[in-house]
Amino acid sequence: MQNRQEKAFDYADAAIKQLVTLATAVIGATILIFDNQNMAGVQIGGGYTLVAGLGLTVLSILFGLFAGNRLAGILVEDAAHPVPKINDKVAYRLWALQMITFTVGVALIVVAAFLQNGADAEAMPPTPPLPSAFPASA
């Protein structure tokens, strides 16, 4: 395999792995943040927005695994050829789906966090006036 093709395959493989790792970390952090600590087990609030965000993030991991498997398949299929083709439409579509589902999933998780914090927010008491720097003379 030529050096440029090898670098292209390495880059594609690394990009897929990094996004799978990020998606896994986002799911773990989301469970940690949204978990109700007062109840035993994992009790996640947040409503449908959070569930949709987590679902899309899990789907992103699956698309990443499929894209990585497709890259391996390209290398096996093209073993007879001296230079495998990195420009595979199936691998590109799987990677694009991985990126899109990850981005939308994280955006929905952020929206769910804002919605939950907005619902739990209490009105702050008015700020008392600041004392003047110079006391009033009598």
Image (spheres, rainbow, N blue to C red):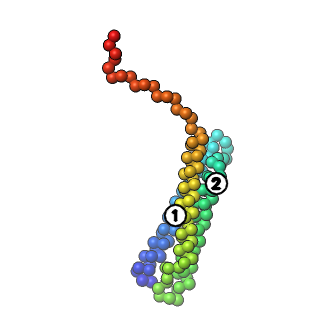
In the rendered image, which residue does mark 2 sit on? 51
Q: Name the front one of labels 2 and 1.
A: 2
In the rendered image, which residue does mark 1 sit on? 19
Quarter holding the C terminus? top left
Q: Which residue is drawn at 56% across and 66% down?
A: 98
Amino acid type at image mark 1:
Leu
Which image quarter: residue 69? bottom right
Nearer the N terminus, badge 2 or badge 1? Answer: 1
Q: Say if 50 sits above or below 8 in the image.
A: above
The image position of residue 105, as x and y in percent, is: 57, 58
Residue 44 makes an appearance in the image: no
What is the number of callouts on the image? 2
Q: Residue at x 56, y 38 (%)?
A: 121
Q: In terms of depth relative to the viewer, which is nearer, 82 or 55?
A: 55
Q: Say if 76 sits above or below 135 in the image.
A: below
The image position of residue 133, as x and y in percent, is: 33, 23
Q: Which residue is drawn at 64% across and 47% down?
A: 45
The image position of residue 78, as x and y in percent, is: 53, 85
- Left or right of 136 on screen, residue 62: right
